[in-house]
Image (spheres, rainbow, N blue to C red):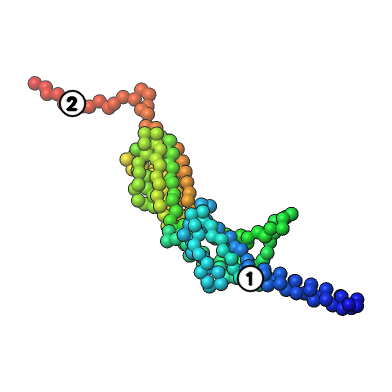
Amino acid sequence: MNLAATWLSALLCLNACAGSATTSESASGFEVEFRATGDDGAVLAGVTLEAGKMPVGVTDSSGGLTTHLRGADGQLVGVRATCPESYASPALLPPLRLTRTRALGSTKREPIAYDVVCQKRVRQVVVVVKAERGKNLPVSLNGKPVATTDADGHAHVLIEMDRSVTSLRVDLDTTAEHSLLPQNPGRTFDLHGRDAVLVFEQPFSVAARPKARPGAQAPRRHVPQRLD
């Protein structure tokens, strides 16, 4: 075999081997690791996932789902997630890019990581009231009486609110305590769609009673007398 024939044979072998490797990689697909959490960071089971309009599975108790997707390297695949009933499903998720990755210094392929976050439909809000000198005062949230302060002026309330509600009004009713200042104080808190702890601190002062003037005497009452 002459030199030209040897080079041609080597080139054909190289092309064939490369084509075989590419075909093998394409056949094995791309390993994808989906991870679902709530907006509070807790892992979330029961999230149904679709890739390229095809169902791929449901996340398990660890919030994870590992699958293989077929496609070309660099291809973008649309992803859709359906969250459990108590969560709002994301309207739009970024596309998944199929690519082969390896950890630095390793020849082992790493799965493609893809995160999905579901928003709670209902948030839990804790309201803490600290009213100095404000014992036994009714506490209202958005105009609804929900609690009464204790002997130290403290109250704690846990409520659930739809995540679409953007604010919460807290009021103290001093109608029965005319000497407390200020009268009927309140505050509006902004909410941001997540669980929250709201602290309403309101010190009161007690209005001083009017003092009698020194030396002041009560006016004498004239009592008519009968003269015989």
* Image quadrant where residue 208 sits: top left
Tell which tag, 2 or 1, sits nearer the viewer. Answer: 1
Give coordinates of residue 27: x percent, y percent. 63, 70
Question: Residue placed at 71% from the left, 72% from the top?
Answer: 20
Q: Residue furthest top?
A: 228
Residue 39 in view (yes/no): no
Q: Is residue 78 above or below residue 222?
A: below
Give coordinates of residue 167: x percent, y percent. 46, 54
User: Considering the image in quadrants, where does the C terminus appear?
Assistant: top left
User: Considering the image in quadrants, where does the N terminus appear?
Assistant: bottom right
Question: Residue placed at 44% from the left, 49% from the top?
Answer: 125
Q: Do the residues labelled 2 and 1 touch (CB within 8 Å)?
A: no
| Amino acid on which disc 2 is placed | Val
- Neighbor class of circle 2 (other Cα within 10 Å; few <14, some 14-19, many 20+) is few
Give coordinates of residue 62: x percent, y percent. 51, 53
Which residue has dot 2 on it?
223
Question: Distance of mark 2 from mark 1, alpha carbons?
Answer: 119 Å
Say which mark, if any, is on residue 183: none
Which residue has dot 1 on it?
27
Q: Which of 67 and 18 is in front in this view?
A: 18
Question: Residue placed at 16% from the left, 26% from the top?
Answer: 224
Question: Residue placed at 60% from the left, 63% from the top?
Answer: 32
| Amino acid on which disc 1 is placed | Ala
Residue 213 in view (yes/no): yes
Give coordinates of residue 184: x percent, y percent. 39, 45
